[in-house]
Amino acid sequence: METPEESSPDQILRPPVNSSADEIRLLDIFPSENKSSPIACSYRVISLKPSDGQQIPFYETLSYAWQDAGSDPETEAPQILIDHTSFPVSASLLRALRRLRFPDRIRTIWIDAVCINQSDNVEKTQQVNLMRRIYASCTQCNIWLGYPRDVGVSEEDAQAAFDTIAWISATGEAMDARFSGMDVPNPALPDWFQDGEDGGKEGLNGELRLRATEAFYKLFRTPWWSRVWTVQEAILPPAATVYWGACEMSWHLFDMASEAIMGPTDGRRDEHVGDLMPDEFNRLQLLNYLTCLMRGISFSSAGEEPVSTLYRWRDRKSTDLRDKVYGLMGLKGRAYSEEEEAAEEEEEEEEHDDDEEEEEEEKEDEEEEEEAGEEEEAAFLPGIPSCDYTLDAQTLFCRVSWALVKQSNSLEPLMGRRGEGAKLEGLPSWVIDWSQDRWSDGFFYFDTEEHKVPVQVPEADYWAHKSLYYEYCADGPVMVGGGPRLLDESGRVLGLDGFLVDRIAVVEQREVLGRQRVPDDQVLAASAARYGELMGRCHEYFSSASEESCRRWLSGRWMQEYLGVVTGKLDAANPGHYPFDGDEGSWASTYLQHHVLFVTEGAKVGFGPVTSEPGDEVWILELCRHPVVLKPLKSEDQEGEGANRCHVTWVGDCCVYGIMMGEAVKGKEDAWVEVAVH
């Protein structure tokens, strides 16, 4: 037997791949009945666009977390044999291959870490751009979650968790069948359901029930669920199987179980699976782990606006920050305007009818062009046609933010910023940092230099602000400027036309926001303390302000404005307009709790990002339905070309009583100026 050569991944002699032929490497895993024997494999190259009359060879894919909970990269250095040469892999990958290796036949799998030369950015870019087709063309994907013991779960309890998912799925199908008039009973309850004092749903916590409940919880806490690449790896393949140690189950059952828990969206069914679940599940809200994860995957699978997909999976982890974007580019995006999308589809149908009248050779050429066009239209994000690992993360995030603004033809993708800073250094203020975590450290909530205390604030709540965004039109009905544009070749300065409304004079004391989340029914009561503190600051400010500012404050309807802000009734002309789907307490907890209240020099009341400061400016920007807070740059930063522009940095969108319906810009078309956002 040959002694294998030891080598690093960079030194492995991989068979070359032809990028013009869309070639990829596959790994043929040789069989063994001995589970502990070394993993022996061989490379094989195939094309994803085979010649006429040929089909793409059968192969599978693998989806896994590079490091699982049971591996220690400091002490483990596992290897496999590829064409008689040692190839270092992670412990997680080695475990997955041992689990998947057949005892009696070759198994062919595509594995990103092994089949792509990760140290060659040119090849990596080309191969990652094929990943949508790689996963879509496989026979199935193998999803490896690791071993249950890695998270303190036995194989028996892990199987109980899988059995629970299968039971939920089957019960949902039975309920749907009964609604359709068929006499279909529910499947038998899993044994562990009945491990209680009375052997039923209301039974006390028996040992099996506690263990199975814990296993269900830990199933969805395995590292696989936290990685960004695993989203498209679960969506794109035609089928998938989930492996957790010795347990295995169709991915389809996970999806079916989630749908069964959610029930029909139109409320047609009176029965609900959750009503049959043990109290432990309902009390600990364990079903939310399944539904939140699977529903998110379902939304992304159906196609959604790229900004929604990027925000939905922003918390997922990746070793390379650029993969926060590239790891999702295999998914299909959806245009912002459904009307434009329908018009394009109608135009394509008309072109197809015309093609049928052409000669056969011309027809084939047209079909090829149409396919290429469809491929381009199906790109995840127009303007970012492909992955490019020669770009740094800062440049990529700038391009992505600009592409989102261009695609939506609005500033809607930039909404929802609550003051979180950029984790990635060197980003312009308006650019979205996709590497940011859910919580951000480092905002100083005390006003004096001696008492600066960093506390956590939540990341941008794009979803809440998006639902509110289209309720208002602060920019008015008339298009004034030429639309968003980039003002420098590097794509870092965003140009817009805007109207300066006012400057912020007073901001509430920000350390009050460091408290824990207040329940919805208590937020309005808690706002009384914020009101008193804010009014005290306003009295101090306006008593020493100019005579005109003082007159505005004393004659203003500040109490009405304050109540409008805290209750969500911001339309002065229509006090009954309420844009939020919920009560006033939930409005306050959603929009007020993680913002600061402020009053402008003109005595306008509003709320905005927690980093808003006196001297910041409230602007109306073109193609932006909400006002925004911008921080003016110092005069020395405005020299040279573009000195006549208003140079600012982005703070975030805000809500201000009495200007949300275009009142501030009505008849002020000549007062708009060019704004350069750095």
Image: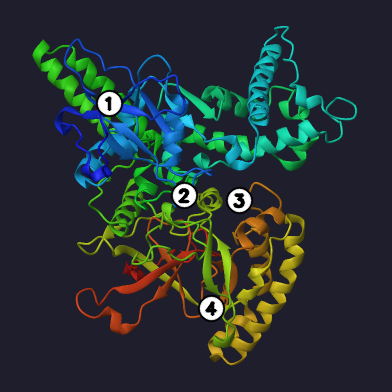
| The label number, if any, that marks residue 602 in the structure image | 4
Closer-to-camera residue (76/583): 76
What's the CA distance linking mark 3 and mark 4? Answer: 25 Å
Residue visible at 48% across and 47% down in the picture: 316
Three-letter code, disc 1:
Met
The image shows residue 585 at horizontal and vertical percentages of 72, 56
The disc at residue 27 is none
Q: Which residue is mark 1?
A: 1
- Residue at mark 2 to residue at mark 4: CA–CA distance: 38 Å
Badge 1 marks a residue whose secondary structure is loop
The colour scheme applied to this rendered structure is rainbow
Does 377 sit above or below residue 677?
above
Q: Residues within 10 Å of mark 2 (few under 14, many from 20)?
A: some
- Say the numbered circle drawn on residue 314: 2
Among the two numbered marks 3 and 4 on one chain, the one whose residue lies closer to the N terminus = 3
Q: Which residue is mark 3?
A: 579
Q: Residues within 10 Å of mark 4 (few under 14, many from 20)?
A: some
Q: Is tag 1's residue or tag 2's residue first in the polypeptide sequence? A: 1
